[in-house]
Structures are given as C-alpha cells and as structure tokens.
Image: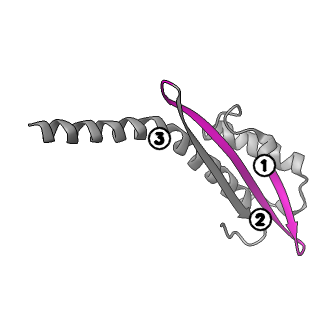
Amino acid sequence: MIGFVMVLGVLGFFAYAAMKLWPAYSEYFGVVKSMKSMQEVSGVEQMSIEQLRDHIDAMFSIQYVDEQNVPLSSLTLVTANGEHSLHIAYDRDIPFMYNIDLLVHFDHTVDLAHGATY
C-alpha cells in the first residue's frame, strides 16, 4: 500500500508539471504555425522586419498567442547569402510551486525562401 501511495505521489507531481507546462507549449505551437504561414505570403522576401512583425502580430491574435509572453521584439530577420530567415527566441518563466519556477526556452527558425524549417 505504501508503494502504491508513493507511485501516485510521483505520478501526481509529473501530472501537475505537465498541466503547468502545457499552455506554454500550446502557445509555442501557435508561434510556429504563424511563422510557417509567413512562407505562403507573396513577396515575403522583400518585406522589412516591421512589415513581417505586423503580419506575425495578426497571425498571433488568430493563434491565441499573447504578446506579453511572446514579444514581437524577439522576432528577428536573418539574411545570409541573399536568403531570408525568420528567427524567434524567447523564454517563459512559469511559476510552479512556492519559490520554484520552471524556465522554458523556445527557439525556432523558418527559411522564408525555400519553405524549410529548422
């Protein structure tokens, strides 16, 4: 019986952690989907970073991405060898219990020219 209670305690701990982390990952999936949708926009290779951020901001509102959690300033345009990539990197600090927080780092890049992601 004591072993069963210990197993339930461990499973409960990890279930609680998953419940706290799921909203951050769900939001990240919305960020990735928004960035991938930019590959479909015509003339995206010639857009400035301000124009890209405006388009992404509209996509974020559709995907329920909160700008307080994912600031548009974390979105950068990377140009290498004449090809453009859209890069985002941000951190989420999630309160877990008492004085313990979970820090999650998200980093994603989308190649605007070829549609490849990495």
Provide residue 51's location: percent of width, then percent of height.
87, 47
Can the viewer see residue 43? Answer: no
Toward the top, the furthest residue is: 98
x and y, in percent, of residue 69 in the image:
66, 35
For marks 1 and 3, give the CA distance: 22 Å
Q: Is residue 88 visible?
A: yes
Q: Secondary structure at mark 2?
A: loop
Q: Are marks 2 and 1 in contact (CB under 8 Å)?
A: no
**Left or right, residue 78 beside residue 34:** right
Q: Position of residue 73 (x, y in %)?
A: 81, 42
- Mark 2 lies on residue: 112
- Quarter of the picture containing the C terminus is bottom right
Determine the residue positioned at 56% across, 34% down: 94
Q: Residue furthest front?
A: 2
Tell which of 83 and 37 is nearer to you: 83
- Residue 115 position within the rendered picture, expressed as x and y whole percent measured from the top left: 70, 69
Q: Residue at x 73, y 52 (%)?
A: 88
Horizontally, is 32 left or right of 44 in the view?
Answer: left
User: How crowded is the residue under tag 3: few (<14 C-alpha within 10 Å), some, or many (20+)?
Assistant: few
Spatial CA distance of label 2 from label 1 is 14 Å
Residue at mark 3 to residue at mark 2: CA–CA distance: 28 Å
Neighbor class of circle 2 (other Cα within 10 Å; few <14, some 14-19, many 20+) is: many
Callout 3: SS:
helix
* Residue at 41%, 41% in the rendered image: 18
Amino acid under label 1?
Leu
Q: Which residues are magenta?
A: 76-98
Neighbour tally class for label 1: few under 14, some 14-19, many 20 plus, Cα within 10 Å: many
Front label number (3 vs 2): 3
Q: Residue at x 66, y 43 (%)?
A: 91
Residue 75, numbered circle: 1
Which residue does the numbered mark 3 point to in the structure image?
A: 22
Q: Nearer the viewer, mark 2 or mark 1?
A: 1
